[in-house]
Image (cartoon, rainbow, N blue to C red):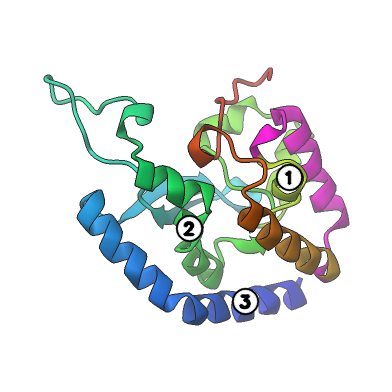
Amino acid sequence: MMLKRLFDIFGALAGLVLFAPVILLLALLIRIKLGSPVLFRQVRPGRDARPFEMVKFRTMTDARDVDGKLLPDAERLTRFGRFLRSASLDELPELWNVLKGDMSLVGPRPLAMAYLPLYSPEQNRRHEVRPGITGLAQVRGRNTLSWNDRFALDVDYVDTHNLWLDMRILVETVMIVLRRDGVQAGGQEDVNSFDGTN
């Protein structure tokens, strides 16, 4: 585990330095095109389901109806926001979460807190490790997988993870992102909400 953590720290630092110009440019474009704040913050379950605040680039506007209520996500997601999601550029700020120790470079994706009571005991095992920016499910089908298949892959990762597997998943992730494989609904992470049965 210590080796994985060191790998995460080195990888997150290298990523933040390498992508610093891209991060700054995207922050500026998001401020111009989508408004403020530039970052989207949401509480997600981490290791042992402990909550943490995950940060991503925002991909939606704050457009509201005549009553002042936010419009549905699909109406607030712009073409620029879809591009950020499909290219996974909205995930870059999560490198900060990795550096802090909330996340790992590789692990099960952190999902909504509302899903916690819906998991079966086996599915809940996905929280035995730190959540990741990418994971086994993301390189085995991404959004094209059913929830049950995604959770099965998450648990498989929990049982088999090692540094070699992490490096392989990272390389495969780069290739998948470049090809835009497995992207649906404008790159949205959760195509359909999990209701405990699907």
At horizontal 83% and vertical 63% (from top left) the residue drawn is 165
- Residue 68 is left or right of residue 149, and the answer is left
At horizontal 68% and vertical 20% (from top left) the residue drawn is 198
> Count the marks: how many?
3
- Residue 183 is left or right of residue 175, and the answer is left
Query: What secondary structure is marked by label 2?
Result: helix
Query: What secondary structure is marked by label 1?
Result: helix
Residue 132, visible in the rendered structure: no
Near mark 1 (Cα within 10 A), the count class, few <14, some 14-19 or many ≥20, is many
> Mark number for residue 2?
none
Q: Earlier in the sequence, mark 2 or mark 1?
A: 2
**Given contact means CB atoms under 8 Å apart, are the residues at marks 2 and 3 in contact?**
no
Is residue 147 found inside the magenta-colored segment of the image?
A: yes
At horizontal 12% and vertical 19% (from top left) the residue drawn is 67
- Residue 98 is left or right of residue 143, and the answer is left
Residue 75 falls in image quadrant: top left
Q: Which residues are magenta?
A: 143-163
Q: Where residue 71 sits: x, y (%)?
A: 27, 26
Judging by the rendered image, the residue that carries numbered circle 1 is 137
Near mark 3 (Cα within 10 A), the count class, few <14, some 14-19 or many ≥20, is some
- Which residue extends farthest right? 160
Disc 1 marks which amino acid? Answer: Ala
Most prominent secondary structure in the magenta stretch?
helix
Residue 7 falls in image quadrant: bottom right
Judging by the rendered image, the residue that carries numbered circle 3 is 11
Distance in Å between CA atoms under marks 2 and 3: 17 Å
Residue 12 falls in image quadrant: bottom right
Residue 118, visible in the rendered structure: yes
Q: Earlier in the sequence, mark 3 or mark 1?
A: 3
Q: Where residue 183 sits: x, y (%)?
A: 60, 40
Q: Where residue 154 sits: x, y (%)?
A: 75, 44
Distance in Å between CA atoms under marks 3 and 1: 20 Å
